[in-house]
Image: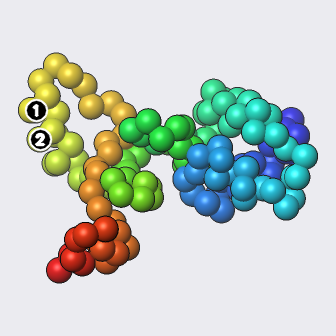
Amino acid sequence: MSTVQTRRVRAALEHLGHATNSELHAELGDVLPELSLTSLHRITARLLERGEIGSVPHDGRGAIFDARAETHDHFVCRVCGIVVDIEIPAEAREAIQEQLGTHLVDDGLVVRGTCAICREVPRAGEPPAP
């Protein structure tokens, strides 16, 4: 049995697809104004532990939760941090595994790059990308 708060957190994550606790907290502010970040952290940790949600391997920005619990691959923009689900073909996974030898590829793979939006926006002192 889940609480109203847990159901709302799940619904918000389903809506967002991928989110940090801070992003979920902001999304839930109008419907659950009494929900503290500490309580939200406990809820997402419990959902993750029960296998009801997934997480995205990250580079230190904090935990990024995934509405999809099953293992899958992601693209992460190195500029803005947007996360997009992708599917790396089996042949590519096998080639990566071959290069790694005894190091197993048993989790979702993460491809990092620059998203289309960030390629359009010039950074300070740089011309826009072609």
Q: Where is residue 80 in the image (x, y as percent from the top left)?
A: 42, 59
The residue sitting at 62% across, 33% down in the picture is: 48
Q: Are marks 2 and 1 in contact (CB under 8 Å)?
A: yes
- Judge by depth and name the residue closer to the eye, 115 or 43: 115
Q: State which quarter of the image contains the C terminus.
A: bottom left
Amino acid at circle 2: Ala
- Judge by depth and name the residue closer to the eye, 9 or 23: 23
The residue sitting at 85% across, 61% down in the picture is: 30
Which residue is outermost to the front?
125
SS for callout 1: helix
Residue under numbered circle 1? 98
Does 111 sit above or below residue 82?
A: above
Q: Can residue 46 be seen in this view?
A: yes
- Judge by depth and name the residue closer to the eye, 127 or 35: 127
Q: In this view, does 81 lie to the left or right of 128?
A: right
Determine the CA span between mark 2 and mark 1: 5 Å
Residue under numbered circle 2? 95
Q: Where is residue 89 in the image (x, y as percent from the top left)?
A: 23, 53
Q: Where is residue 103 in the image (x, y as percent from the top left)?
A: 20, 22
